[in-house]
Image: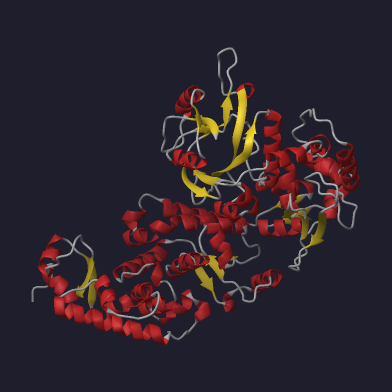
Amino acid sequence: MKLLLDTHTFTQKPQRAEISKINDRIVHCETDITLEHLAIEITNGKTFVSATLKQISNIRKRQKAYWQSQEIIALDIDEGLLLEEAIENPFIKENAAFLYTTFSHTPIHHKFRIVFALDKPLIDYGQFERIWSHLFEMLPQADSACKDGVRLFFGGKKIHVINMNNRLNTQNIIQSKRGFEADIGLLSNMSAQKPLSVKPSNQSRKNSETIISQCSNNVRDIVEQNIESLYTKLQPKNVKLFNMIEVHDYLKKQNLHNFLGIKANSSFNDIFHDEANPSASIFQSNQGNGHFLYKCHSESHPFCGTIIQVVERLLKCSIVEAEDFLMKVYKIELTETELQKQMRKTLDANKRLLMTQELEQLYPNFYKVIKPFREDLYILFDLVKEYLPSGNNPEIMFYHSIREIAKHLCLSTESANKRMGLFSLLELILKYDEDCIPPELSQRFTEWQKQKRYKYRNSVYGIPSYSYDLLSIIELKCKKYLENGMTLKSICYEGIYRNFGIIEANRVFPQDKNKEINELNDIVSTKLEKTMLSQINQSGFTTESYVIDEVKLYFRGQQQYKHEQLKRCLGEIIEKYCLSRVRLDKLLKEKLGFEGNGYPFVILFEEKLLRIQGILTV
């Protein structure tokens, strides 16, 4: 693959002065490189241009006029698509070579690039533009401002290989775009308003006329953002809504036939690509929520989306811009009650407290426990702010499935469930029994459950104000959490039950209220307890790894199971026998005669520890 590759490496996004130097340097850095080697160089922080340049009058510049050839195309994704969603996207899986996260990528804000390799070099810039246009149609979340063939792409953090053997079929794409750009482009690319030199074929002209007649020019109005014309055709009524859940629900219930001006009741020609046989249809979702869906059934240009995704593709914009446009078209006013404004202030205050530099000094145990998970709370706060409940209840309640929460946190459902359990244990997030939910909210959640066809009711959560009194309680809980050697592996009904008692276990996991502990878990916990006491009595101390190694079980996965079970019952054993779990220091290492490497945590009788430390002398 021939392209331009800078010789300098970076560990973060280059700044203005560095970019100027890269620009001067890279025009002289043409190389022929494999995709695998390119991926390595990208993670080394090297900048590349996905094209080669020609000389004009002995000058070579990174400008369109100097473009010579292209063998790869990279798309920039800054919003609208999560990394995990991109990796699982059918089009990307079938066509892309690899993805890489940029220097600006964070767990909260995903930023990455998708790299496509072409099956043959392009030497016509118009062909490159057609292929880029096709890729943008398939992935409208890409940054439309980054379609310059000689653009700089900075290096990044991590490569996610899709298939290094994937190649885009350039001939098929170029042929499918020929003629279509001249006529259908009026509908899907109207905003660009560029003169097109390609003469349309008779078939494509006939197809475009069919689409225009079907759409009654609504698509043209949408692309041109002619809201006054859409007002005349749609006759929307002024609507006041209180949160984005209500906005989304209202928009998705708008009849897509009317919005697009589609007259056909059956299949019709897709508005996003040229086709001889109609493959598109509009129908209502089978979820029973009244939402309309647009679907293109063609194999080459598959698409399915609500009114929001349709507008994203037509306007080539972000989801936020699509929402703003639709709210104007349908005269939606998003208003906040005084209670909602107060809720927003509470969430912002909570976030500021977690971010304060004094948190470690004020609440050291809380800081140690929550530090790895603060970003998860920030994401949850932002999610809740989008869907603040309306009504007269001052409590900040939200209702989401653990799967939806996991998606926003970019975690597995199991990991997200553990985090929500920890937040609930510490009372950073509250879980409500059904009896405690106000009737108006309970009714709304029941309707949502029916719409989503969930078999079971999702948990209803609340976020309290992180007051001084609450944080004092949390600090004490975190102290016990750390002293008992708890981790996220301890966060389950049994783990909370053994460490904090049945009342706390029922509060944190109300769906498992008064659940009986598994018989095998009880048997293994007893074995772990006896082994721990035997080792302490024999050697004066033990460690968690010593205990796990001595207890023998004979089934697959027993090592992990023993580790998790010990994390659940360790606190209970420590309290039951007045033990202490403490990290070794030089004095303690010497007094205990510990011969291992490092300074791990040891478990011993509290009385013995106090004697060694000189606190207890009798």
580 left or right, relative to 145? left
**In front: 109, or 214?**
214
- Please give the count of numbered marks on the rendered protein: 0
Q: Residue at x 80, y 30 (%)?
A: 198
26 left or right, relative to 562? right
Q: Residue at x 81, y 49 (%)?
A: 270
Q: Quadrant of the N terminus?
A: top right
Quarter residue 170 falls in: top right
Compared to residue 11, the image places residue 449 above or below, namely below
Compared to residue 187, the image places residue 57 above or below, namely above
Estimate the x, y position of residue 86 in percent, counting from the top left: 59, 51
**In front: 124, or 585?**
124
> In this orientation, does residue 394 appear?
no
Quarter residue 359 falls in: bottom left
304 left or right, relative to 375? right
**In front: 565, or 383?**
565
Q: Residue at x 20, y 82 (%)?
A: 534
Q: Quadrant of the C terminus?
A: bottom left
Estimate the x, y position of residue 449 in percent, counting from the top left: 67, 71
Quarter residue 460 falls in: bottom right
Q: Residue at x 47, y 85 (%)?
A: 514
- Look at the image and name its color scheme: secondary structure
Compared to residue 588, the image places residue 308 above or below, namely above
Estimate the x, y position of residue 494 in percent, counting from the top left: 41, 79
Residue lying furthest top: 57
97 left or right, relative to 229? left
> In this orientation, does residue 387 appear?
yes
